[in-house]
Image (cartoon, helix red, strand yellow):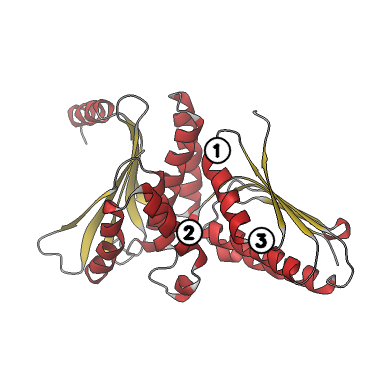
């Protein structure tokens, strides 16, 4: 399956799903006008990847390093994470890393909420070094 | 506007701590340009990291609320509104927005905002979490994102958010909606 790469823009994050390495990265900021148009294809791609590699047994590593996301992005980012958790529930090994700036309590709390909600996979909250 | 009026306008704005003001039509390009400007302004006045994030977040939610929900018929076919960000005293900020709304949507807006004014921060965070996990509103055109958007503004605010709905005599179809968040 071809890797997915979406370069960052002012309002959308960099999306680098290196399927060949089972490593998924989302970083930057997210406040597109239409979050569904942006995240729809990403969700479809991730769905295909998880579906076609279900039996292969490779651990999936996901990295979310987001500085800001608006309310409509929030729902859709959560859905991506829910999909990863679903894969873990089906027996796949999944580790999700949630990065936040040291003074960004909101981002840290969001990560902790995710960890509390999605228990089938490992969620690691990682504090980034001060800039 | 003549020079005397402009002078008065600038004095008022400066006295109120205005950092940014825009009135006109809203598009994603406009929102993008405004966000860059706002970020520079916040940095220029030395706002802390957390304050900058909260102000920016409230600002984007309000701007995109106008972008998605300001009534086009009231704006001559365009989504129009106004936004302002200012500093009130020591490291405190305020974010304001205004846009026309249909009179028959007013009750719904009140129903969403009034409860937020009496909730504690913990209750707001709980409501936020519930709204986030509830996919039921996705198909509802009128409320698409609106619940989580207002909850986000309430979450960033340091006091209960304030809003006002103003009717103009002779105008039967639209009212003016205004929202204020103190950060």
* Image side of residue A105 versus residue B81, left or right: right
Q: Measure the alpha-carbon separation of dots 1 and 2.
A: 18 Å
Quadrant of the drawing holding the C terminus of chain B: top left
Which residue occupies 40% across, 50% down? B122
Q: Marks 3/2: CA distance?
A: 16 Å
Q: Chain of mark 1?
A: A
Identify whether B41 is placed above or below A37.
above
Q: Secondary structure at mark 1?
A: loop
Residue B127 seen in render: yes
Q: From the image, tell me which residue sits under label 2.
A: B129
Residues under numbered marks 3 and 2 in contact, where contact means CB atoms less than 8 Å apart = no
> What is the number of the mark on residue A119?
3
Relative image position of residue B77 (x, y in whole percent): 35, 65
Q: Is residue B111 above or below residue A23?
A: below
Q: Which numbered disc covers residue A104?
A: 1
Closer to the observer: label 3 or label 1? 3
**Front-lying residue, B56 or B5:** B56
> Front-most of B100 and B162?
B162
Q: Chain of mark 2?
A: B
Which of discs 1 and 2 lies nearer the camera? The answer is 2
User: As drawn, is B37 to the left or to the right of B124?
Assistant: right
Chain bearing tag 3 is: A
Query: Percent from the top left, x then y, of residue A61?
Result: 79, 54
x and y percentages locating residue A74 in the rendered image: 54, 57
Q: Residues within 10 Å of mark 3 (few under 14, many from 20)?
A: few
Label 2 element class: helix
Cα separation, mark 3 vs mark 1, equals: 23 Å
Q: Which mark is residue B107?
A: none
Inspect this view and state whether residue A6 appears: no
Camera-nearest label, 3 or 2:
3
Relative side of A28 to B24, left or right: right
Q: Quadrant of residue B173?
A: bottom left
């Amino acid at each position: 399956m071809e890797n997915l790469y979406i370069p960052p823009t002012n309002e959308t994050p960099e999306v680098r799903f290196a399927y060949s390495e089972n490593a998924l990265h989302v970083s930057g900021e997210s406040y597109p006008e239409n979050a569904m148009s942006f995240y729809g294809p990403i969700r479809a791609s991730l769905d295909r990847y998880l579906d076609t590699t279900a039996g292969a047994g490779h651990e999936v590593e996901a990295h979310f390093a987001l500085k800001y996301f608006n309310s409509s992005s929030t729902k859709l980012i959560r859905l991506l994470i829910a999909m990863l958790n679903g894969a873990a529930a089906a027996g796949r090994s999944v580790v999700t890393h949630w990065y936040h700036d040291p003074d960004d309590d909101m981002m840290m709390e969001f990560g902790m909420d995710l960890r509390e909600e999605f228990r089938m996979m490992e969620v690691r909250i990682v504090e980034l070094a001060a800039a | 506007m003549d020079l005397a009026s402009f002078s008065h306008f600038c004095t008022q704005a400066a006295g109120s701590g205005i950092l940014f003001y825009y009135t006109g039509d809203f598009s994603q390009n406009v929102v993008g340009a405004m966000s860059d400007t706002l970020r520079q302004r916040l940095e220029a006045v030395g706002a802390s990291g957390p304050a900058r994030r909260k102000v920016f977040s409230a600002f984007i939610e309000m701007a995109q609320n106008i972008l998605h929900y300001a009534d086009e018929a009231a704006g001559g076919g365009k989504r129009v509104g106004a936004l302002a960000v200012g500093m009130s005293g020591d490291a405190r900020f305020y974010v304001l927005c205004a846009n026309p709304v249909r009179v028959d949507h007013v009750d719904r807006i009140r129903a969403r905002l009034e409860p937020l004014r009496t909730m504690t921060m913990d209750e707001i965070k709980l409501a936020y979490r519930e709204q986030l996990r509830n996919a039921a509103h996705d198909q509802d055109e009128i409320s698409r994102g609106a619940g989580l958007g207002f909850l986000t503004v309430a979450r960033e605010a340091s006091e209960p958010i304030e809003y006002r709905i103003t009717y103009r005599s002779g105008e039967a179809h639209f009212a003016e909606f205004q929202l204020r968040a103190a950060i």
